[in-house]
Amino acid sequence: MSLLMHTLHVDLGERSYPVYIGRDLLADSQLLARHVAGSQVVIVSNETVAPLYVEKVRALLGRRKLITEIVLPDGEQYKTLDTLANIFDRVMAENHNRTTTFIAVGGGVVGDITGFAAACYQRGVDFIQVPTTLLAQVDSSVGGKTAVNHPLGKNMIGAFYQPRAVLIDTNTLQTLPARELSAGLAEVVKYGLICDEPFYRWLQEQMPRLLAREEAALAEAIERSCTSKARVVAADEREGGIRAILNFGHTFGHAIETAQGYGQWLHGEAVATGMLLALELSARRGWIPASEVGDFCELLRGMHLPVQAPLDMTAQAFLELMARDKKVVDGRLRLILLKAIGDADIVDDVSESELVNLLQGTDHGA
């Protein structure tokens, strides 16, 4: 077992589960197997990740009667009902029963679709998250949100369904493309902005180390991010209240992803731009200093993330897509804004004119 492993717990009563964080977890012969109850396993990965890690995961499972490997195409554009149906076709053809365990090995797309498949198959079977991207490690693997996309909206078809365990092997980040590392760091920064100002200030100072993939810095960033998310999820599992703050920047970001075509902008890239818009709106309301918007813009530039929405997206296009967002309640759009750095609030009184002025008047340059 890794001597540097840290274990967090997502406290949800009978649905509680551990989140293991450390290096060489995929070399631990006992860690994964202890969370697999039956003799059947479905490993779901994608074309990019499978050659790197699926054999390692398979080796950890010992002698199982049936292990089915499903390798999906790589990309957000494949996070669809058709792909979900293909997973069901395989597991039904190979006679997986209610004791089977689904294991997601990959990034957020693999984790989301595997979790949703597990939630639906025979009305729910166990699943385990083995996230291999930074974004999945700090965000989508923890909390039980599972879904697929629809052409009219991102993550509109899904379920809340918690994993049995999350295994975060930090070694997997060494094979992560630089663009995806930056996209994942956007979600890391989010936690500092919404609920942990000291963490945000630490990130501003330590970003060069994180971009250089220094192991100690990455491990600390992952642990602090997952701790924040676990605390929020434990307080509000199904997003009836405080959990909505985790969507900071996402309403704008999801509109960008949907308009541009899934996969053209990485999720973290779209969220980064969305967070910048939300900060600008917070500043326009007088809640945070304008200087914080400028500082955040410079931080994003240093992270090689976009600081401007797509030039071909009009304010009207944003409004139409945001009106279909999951966070619209009784016709009122809920946005997450900042009362201060580290203090997010859920608001539903942003007028259309405010949004139009924001979307037409914000230009932080390319």
Image (tube, rainbow, N blue to C red):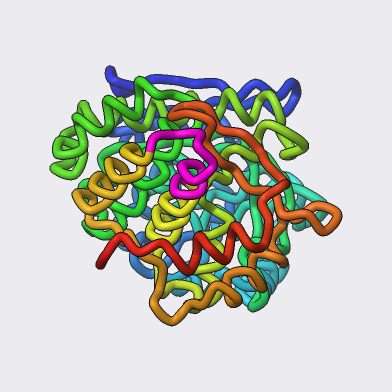
Q: Is residue 207 left or right of residue 358?
A: left
User: Residue visible at 72% across and 67% down?
Assistant: 324
Residue 142 in percent (x, y) is at: 55, 38
Say which quarter of the image contains residue 209: top left
Q: Residue furthest right?
A: 330
Q: Residue furthest bottom?
A: 312
Say which quarter of the image contains residue 188: top left
Residue 292 or residue 211, whichever sits in front: 292
User: Residue visible at 65% across and 64% down?
Assistant: 322
| Count of marks overlaid on the render | 0
Above or below — where is 49 with respect to 284?
below
Residue 124 in percent (x, y) is at: 77, 48
The answer, for residue 121, to whether it is visible in the render is: yes
Above or below — where is 54 with respect to 73?
above
The answer, for residue 62, to whether it is visible in the render is: no
User: Residue visible at 19% across and 31% down?
Assistant: 206
Residue 215 in percent (x, y) is at: 19, 32
User: Residue visible at 72% across and 54% down?
Assistant: 333
Magenta-colored span:
279-289
Residue 224 or residue 314, whichever sits in front: 314
Residue 138 in percent (x, y) is at: 44, 39
Residue 203 or residue 24, whichever sits in front: 203
Residue 128 or residue 1, whichever sits in front: 128
Q: Quadrant of the N terminus?
A: top left
Q: Is residue 57 left or right of residue 228?
A: left
Q: Quadrant of the C terminus?
A: bottom left
Above or below — where is 237 with respect to 235?
below
Q: Is residue 17 left or right of residue 179?
A: right
Is residue 282 rendered magenta in the image? yes
Is residue 12 rendered magenta in the image? no
